[in-house]
Amino acid sequence: MSDTWNTRTKLVHEGSRRSQYGEMAEAIFLTQGFVYPTAESAEARFVQSGPDEFIYARYGNPTTRMFEERIAALEGTEDAFATASGMAAVSGALTSMLRAGDHVVSSRALFGSCLYVLEEVLTRFGVKVTFVDGADLDQWRAAVTPGTKAVFFESMSNPTLELVDIRAVSEIAHAAGALVVVDNVFATPIFSRAVDQGADVIVYSTTKHIDGQGRALGGVVCGTQSFIRKVLEPYMKHTGGSMSPFTAWMHLNGMATLDLRCRAMAESALRIAQALQGHDKLGRVIYPGLDSHPQHGLAMAQMGSGGTMVAFDITAGKEAAFRFLNALEIAKISNNLGDAKTIVTHPATTTHQRLPQDQKDSLGITPGLIRLSVGLEDAGDLIADLLAALDRA
Ligand SMILES: *Cc1c(COP(=O)(O)O)cnc(C)c1O
């Protein structure tokens, strides 16, 4: 609404639309459709609808539109389209822009469902996909050719928190005329500067930090107005992956505190990583905000923060890792992230169970690896919980 607004102001007010009643809170329009005052106005709306004129909730809805405008303003893109899940956003962004014969280059360290879309779905429709080690710029340079239509990567990978240099990969991609599609979930829209760094399309699972309380499944694609409205929207609205207005309404509420939450979580994540580093039962403690992280400099330049996730390796392996997980009292064993509640995950036996051993090895998914999504509890309490459970590991 105002170009001069800073993040926290945008997160509270941007995109708000009020009905004739002037309601304070964002209204939830639980309606599939809209009534036209006359047949002529119905005809006119199907030819060209204005900003406050809707046709059908699969195409757009006032509550969903408020959410799209708020997240686009936050991310710094011209527009956004809200989807039913993070995977609807990833698959929609890629499928809407690609056709048979196109070539895509992707980093190898991907969320399992993203890997499925690239490896199993796109290839079935004749798209050629080349996988690279996302942190190795020489591999990107070798794989991206003038025929490459898009590059895809997670800006911070799951679960080992490896960064991809958005600026450097964007330069390589743009020199070949390829679009840069970034799955930015681990970076969060608060620490993201992806647009300035060259990303063309930015995708979030809003199930994570944006909802922030583990309630709703959702996603969003951010990009230029021409990409969102001319390429993505026709695909999404006709294939059915639009966000429910109820979810958009929950996300609007969640966003008011998004900046506060992400910063508090990142502050606690740094304190936890510092407290765990050097513990005699642990090997690696991975947190991009630690000086010891091999990409610490890149993390600070790219995000200005180490983020809200920590990973560490219990040297004694799986049984010790399970004893540790079972001894925790505050942190919950689950597989979501970005939640107010601290969540611990054992990737080797859950989220990454399906991967063959050689892939687990190459991604650093060891039997003792724990992924920690730091929540909003008191950091001192969390550190005490983690240290007490490590004693019993
Ligand atoms: C969770 C996640 C997704 C998928 O999002 P859903 O909302 O579960 O569909 C995609 N990419 C990353 C990096 C994720 O963490």
Image (cartoon, rainbow, N blue to C red):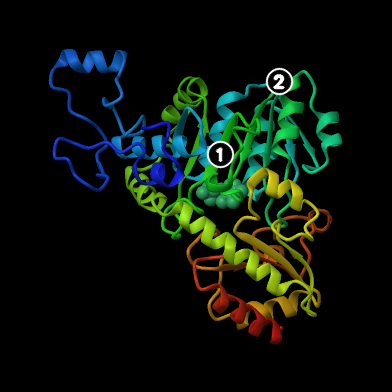
Image location of residue 196, percent across then percent down: 61, 32
Residue 245: quadrant of the picture: top left
Image location of residue 383, percent across then percent down: 61, 77
* Residue 105 can be seen, yes or no: no
Instruction: Identify the disc placed on residue 203.
Output: 1
Q: Is mark 2 within 8 Å of ligand 1?
A: no
Disc 2 to disc 1, how far (Cα)? 24 Å
Q: Name above or below for residue 49 compared with residue 185.
A: above
Q: Residue at x 71, y 73 (%)?
A: 276
Q: Nearer the viewer, residue 220 or 310?
A: 310
Disc 1 crowd, CA 10 A, few/some/many (<14, 14-19, 20+): many
Q: Describe residue 365's horizontal placement relative to residue 184 as left or right.
A: right
Residue 87: quadrant of the picture: top right
Q: Name above or below for residue 271 compared with residue 364.
A: below
Q: Name above or below for residue 255 compared with residue 350.
A: above
Q: Amino acid at mark 1?
A: Val
Q: Describe residue 220's horizontal placement relative to residue 22 as left or right.
A: right
Q: Nearer the viewer, residue 376 or 367?
A: 376
Q: Amino acid at mark 2?
A: Gly
Q: Nearer the viewer, mark 2 or mark 1?
A: 1
Look at the image and tell me in which quarter the C terminus lies: bottom right
Look at the image and tell me in which quarter the N terminus lies: top left
Image location of residue 29, percent across then percent down: 25, 41
Question: Which label's residue is closer to the chain start, 2 or 1?
Answer: 2
Q: Residue at x 48, y 52 (%)?
A: 259
Image location of residue 323, percent across then percent down: 68, 82
Which residue ends up furthest to the bottom in the rendered image?
392
Instruction: Identify the disc placed on residue 147.
Output: none
* Residue 275 can be seen, yes or no: yes
Q: Residue at x 24, y 13 (%)?
A: 44
Residue under label 2, please give it. Answer: 101
Residue 104: quadrant of the picture: top right
